[in-house]
Image (cartoon, rainbow, N blue to C red):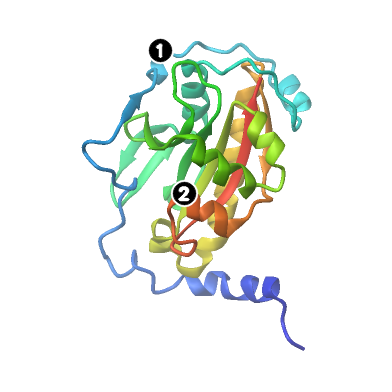
Amino acid sequence: MEQSIGQEYMKQSTCANCSDCDRDKKLTPPPLQLPYAEDSSIIKLPEPDMLADQEINFLELIELRTSVRQYHETPLTLAELSYLLWCTQGVKMAMPQGTSIRNVPSAGARHALETYLYINRVEGVTPGLYRFLALEHALLLVQSGEELNEVMVPAFKNPKMVKTCAVTFIWMAVLERMAYAYGQRAYRYLHLDAGHVCQNLYLAARTINSGVCAIGAFDDERLNAVLGVDGESQFAIYAAAVGK
């Protein structure tokens, strides 16, 4: 009987296919973060230790977690965006061998996700596509302008939600960063890691009176093209709309 794509994926990504990876060969690990040009437009975010503490009832926070698909026109502040980014991909310590300790778990501390932000309404930030530089805790401008909206919004199966939220978080997987340690099983871990990150976003957003809706339905080819990645070694893996 011919196996389905899903069955073949599970078979090829078993632990048996973790062997003989680059880490075992003592090869140089890939960098913790994708490079960028020195003359890039950078926006420094409020430092994590300057962010206000949020008093919460944890059980209430868990029970009230829900997906929110309609948003108010009130923008997020830059401090609020900084807070959400710190909670989802904040780097507490850079470690040897291309690993880091962050505010979310990751297989082998590989942290093979890059966070992109499609910003509609954040105070003091020009709408556009940005990449979060986790090591610097800053935003890197990737693209702005009306033409961006024309290609970004239709890439999602629910374009209205992306068009009306304050920010759409887009997580892009860097395969080599995870495959360095886990070979073909890296594909499983990338998806698991994306889930960890998105759940932190849900919970953190709730503490600042904001809502989140995770997005798994998007046109992979179109979204990868907007991000400027090849869809194979680097690819969009998950997204989430955020707003008041």
Q: Which residue is mark 2?
A: 227
Residue 163 x/y as whole percent: 64, 33
Rounded to the nearest whole Å, what is the CA distance between mark 1 and mark 2? 31 Å
In the picture shown, does residue 6 fall above or below 82?
Answer: below
Residue lying farthest bottom? 1
In the picture shown, does residue 14 fall above or below 227?
Answer: below
Amino acid type, callout 1 = Met
Q: Which residue is mark 1?
A: 50
Q: Is residue 172 in view from this perspective?
A: yes
Residue at x-position 67% and y-position 44%: 215
Where does the N terminus fall, quadrant-wise? bottom right
Q: Secondary structure at mark 1?
A: helix
Where does the C terminus fall, quadrant-wise? top right
The number of numbered badges drawn on the structure is 2
Q: Are marks 1 and 2 in contact (CB under 8 Å)?
A: no
Residue 192 x/y as whole percent: 59, 51
The quarter holding residue 20 reads bottom left
First reached walking from the N terminus: tag 1 or tag 2: 1
Q: Is residue 107 in view from this perspective?
A: no
Residue 108 x/y as whole percent: 44, 52
Q: Relative to residue 150, is residue 217 drawn left or right?
A: right
- Graded by Cα atoms within 10 Å as few (under 14), some (14 to 19) or many (20 or more), the crowding at tag 1 reads few
Q: Secondary structure at mark 2?
A: helix
Residue 46 x/y as whole percent: 39, 17
Toward the viewer: 119 or 9?
119
Toward the viewer: 10 or 149?
149
Toward the viewer: 199 or 162?
162
Residue at x-position 59% and y-position 33%: 200
Residue at x-position 64% and y-position 70%: 10
Amino acid type, callout 2 = Leu
